[in-house]
Amino acid sequence: MGSPLLIGVFPFGLIYGAAAREAGLSLTQTVSMSLLVFAGSAQFVFVELWQNKAAFLVLVLTCLALNLRLIIYGASLSQELGPPRGPLEALIRSYMLTDESYVSSAIGFRKPGFSSRKLLYYLGAGLPTWLGWQSAGLIGYLVGSLIPPDWPMVMAAPLIFLALLISLLRAAEPKNRPVKCSAAIAAGLAAIAADNLPLNLGLLLAIAVGVGVALWLEQSRKKREDGQ
């Protein structure tokens, strides 16, 4: 279920491994971060900020803000998966939560026949991504210097996120689609406008703009519905 996503995940992981080595991280640090954190975009931002000698507080807050979206993902999936049956299941579900596993599950849960197999479907979407990311990071660290610099691998990350975004918007309920599309467009425009801000602050601004637009439009829609 998650295997097709490896087309984008694996090159992204190779870049992460190579970038981590270039930033001065050891092999143990690079692999440990993938195993313990398992958040590709946050790991990539961490390496970039580390290489630019950003303040530790800025580094932590940036990665934290970048991963706040996972709280929304988790709340959304919990409505489908129900409460975890014990701390071990809660830990596994949280650990496997990524953009890829969320989008795959959110779309897959809408298909008939998954009422009793949603957890297995969720894990099936997350496990290939986990395996691909771990192996790609390791390979990227070991042989990243051998990758030709003219290979457009850096495009893997934005392309996979764009594919996930389009898939999620297409799968949204018709009444919610305008809000989500507007929020995505607003966040994209904010990211472009703030691209030159230092320390990836433009990314934080884009997240805030997207969430703010979504909340404002959702509240406006509810007011109109209550007034009818």
Image: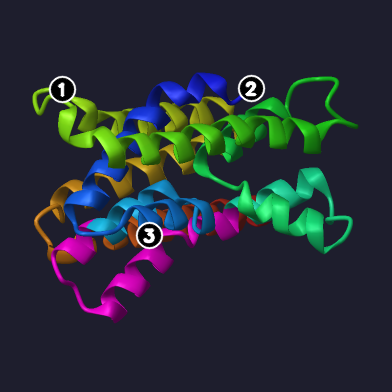
Residue 208, quarter of picture: bottom left
Q: Which label belongs to residue 151? A: 1
Cα distance between the residues tagged 3 and 2: 30 Å
- Within-10-Å neighbours for mark 1: few <14, some 14–19, many 20+: few
Query: Is residue 54 inside the magenta stretch?
Result: yes
Q: Look at 45% across and 51% down and name the residue there.
A: 34
Helix, strand or loop status at disc 2: loop
Give the residue type at disc 2.
Met
The amino acid sitting under disc 3 is Gln
Which picture quadrant has residue 52? bottom left
Where residue 160 sits, quadrant-wise, is: top left
| Extent of the magenta region | 48-72
| Coloring scheme used | rainbow
Q: Does residue 173 appear anywhere in the picture? A: no
Mark 3 or mark 2: whose residue is earlier in sequence: 2
Picture disc at residue 180? none
Q: Nearer the viewer, residue 165 or 160?
A: 160
Q: Which residue is mark 2?
A: 1
The answer to whether 117 appears left or right of 194 in the picture is right
Residue at point 61%, 55% (across, down): 222
For marks 2 and 1, give the CA distance: 28 Å
Residue type, numbered disc 1:
Trp
Q: Position of residue 33 (x, y in %)?
A: 43, 57
* Residue 3: % across, % down: 55, 21
Of circles 2 and 1, the one toward us is 1
Is residue 25 visible to us here? yes
Residue that carries the numbered disc 3 in the rendered image = 29
**Gap in Å between the C-alphas at discs 3 and 1?**
26 Å
| For the residues bearing labels 2 and 1, Cβ distance under 8 angstroms | no
Instruction: Tell me which secondary structure the magenta stretch mostly adopts.
Output: helix
Q: How would you rate the neighbour count of disc 3 (Cα within 10 Å): few for under 14, some for 14-19, many for 20 or more?
A: few
